[in-house]
Image: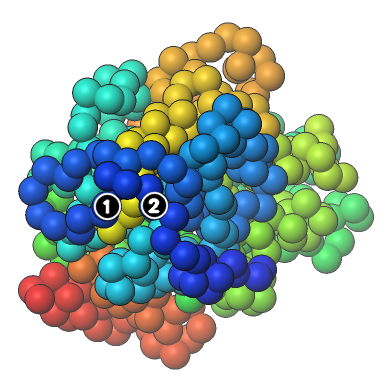
Amino acid sequence: MTTRTITRATALAAAGLLLAACGSSGGSGSGQAGAPSFEGRGPITFVAGKDSTGTVQPMLDRWNKAHPKEKVSFIQLPTDADAQRRQMIQNAETKSDAYTVLSLDVVWTSEFAAHQWIDKLPEDRFPMGKMLKPVVETSRYRGGLYAVPSSSDGGMLYYRTDLLKKAGVAEPPSTWAEMTAACAKVRKLPEAKGMSCYAGQFQKYEGLTVNFAEAVNSAGGTVTDASGKPDVDTPEARKGLDFLTGALKDGTIPKKAVTFQEEDGRQAFQSGELIFHRNWPYVYALAQKSGIKGKFAVAPLPGLDGPGSSSLGGHNMAVSAYAENKATALDFIKFMTSEENTRTFLESASLAPPYASLYDDPALIEQYPYLPVLKESILRAVPRPRVVPYGDVTSAVQQEAYAALTGEKGSEQALKDLQKALRKAVAQ
C-alpha cells in the first residue's frame, strides 16, 4: 500500500538511526558505483512505514524462526510517506548502515537509484516475468532492476451499497456528475442524515499528489509527459482541479477533508460519515471488520466523462547501498516478495499483490470480489512523475494543489504557478 501509499503514530525511526552496525565479516556496505557484492550474512533491519494492518511482524517472526542467525528487526517510520522518505534519505546521506532493506514508495525508486542510495539487484534472482508489467516498471531505473515489488496499489471507489440501493441507485457512478447525483438521492434518506458525499486524501502530503494527479488524469490531462516534461497548465488539468475545488465549495467534499490522510478517510467511511470514499485496497479487509461489513463494495474511480485513472501506488523492496549483510538482505527480499507471501498479505491485509496469477484465481475472487476491479485499476493506472528530483516535484504539486483547495489561489493561477515550479525542479 501503494502506494500505496500504505498508511502508511509514533515513529521508531530515530531509534533506528542509532542502531549499532549489525554486520558480520564479509558484509561491508560499499555505497559505491558499479556492481555491488551481495555478501555477508547476519542480522539486518527492515525499514517501512508504520504497519497499521498488523501483518508485517508475524511474517518477520516466520523468517526469524527459520533464520536465528540472520534475524530481521523491524524499524517502523511514520505513516506520512513524506516523512518516511526524508528519514530514509537522511540515513543514506550519512552513509549509515542502520537501514538494510527499504520499503520504498514506487515513485522513489528512480530518485534513490540515481543517487546510488540503493544497489542494482541481480534480476535472475527474482521472478519478475510473473508480475504485472506496470508494477515491474516501477522497480527499474535506466533498464536496471533496483528494487522488487512487494505490493502494488490502485485507488478504488468505496461506496455504501445499502444506501445506494435504498435510494434507487442501481449502479455505482462512473463519472463525477453521476456520483454527485447519487449523493443527492442518498442524502434524502433519514439514515443518511449528516453524511458527506465523498472524500479522498487532501492533506498537504504525498496523498494529495496522488489525488490531484488522479483528478487531472481522469479529466484527460497530465502532470508530466512520458519524458518527465511538465504539462500541467492545460484546460484538461484545470477541469480536474476544478472538480476538487468545486466539490469542496459546494459541500460534496467535506471541508475537513483537507486534513485527511488515508486513515482519516478510512475511519470516516467506516463510521458512516461518507457515502463514497477513494482509498487503497488495504481498506477492504479493515472495513469488513467494522460496522459496515456487508454494506459496501468497490468500483473503479469515476472521471469526467467515464471511468477515471488511479495513480499507480505500491511499495518496492530495495537494499541500502551502505548496508551490511547483503546476502541475507537478498534472501529476505525474495522471501517477502514471493508469490506465497504476497498472497498471504492479500488474504490478511488486502494488499495488492504484484503477481498477475493471483488476480485471476477463482478461489481468491470468490473470497475477495474486488480483485477484478483492483486489477483494472492497476492496469489503467497512470504513474506519478517518474523523475529523479521527485521530492521537489511532489512538494510543488502539494503546495499549489493545497493552495487551490483551500481557496488561497484559483485553479488557473495554481496550475500556472505549478507549471513554473515543475519546470524549475526538473531542470536542476
> Percent x, y for residue 167?
79, 42
| Callout 2 amino acid | Gly
> Percent x, y for residue 294?
81, 32
- Left or right position of 1 against 286: left
Label 2 SS: loop
Q: Which mark is residue 210?
A: none
Residue 250 picture quarter? bottom right
Q: What is the quadrant of the C terminus in the image?
A: bottom left
| Callout 1 amino acid | Ser
Which residue is pictured at 47% across the width and 65% down the height? 20
Residue 380 picture quarter? top left
Q: How far apart are marks 1 and 2 (CA)?
A: 7 Å
Does residue 139 appear anywhere in the picture?
A: no
Residue 363 picture quarter? top right
Q: Is residue 299 above or below residue 314?
A: above
Does residue 41 appear anywhere in the picture?
A: yes
Label 1 SS: loop
Which residue is pictured at 45% across the width and 25% down the height? 338
Q: In this orientation, which residue lies closer to the viewer: 232 or 352? A: 352
Which residue ends up furthest to the right in the rendered image? 190
- Left or right position of 182 against 237: right
Disc 1: which residue:
28
> Percent x, y for residue 389?
21, 68
- How busy is the neighbourhood of tag 1: few (under 14 within 10 Å), some, or many (20 plus)? some
Count how many numbered circles sit on residues in the image: 2
- Left or right position of 164 against 172: right
Disc 2: which residue:
23
Which residue is pictured at 11% across the width and 39% down the height? 143
CB of mark 1 within 8 Å of CB of mark 2?
yes
Which residue is pictured at 57% across the width and 35% down the height? 68
Which residue ends up furthest to the bottom in the rendered image? 408
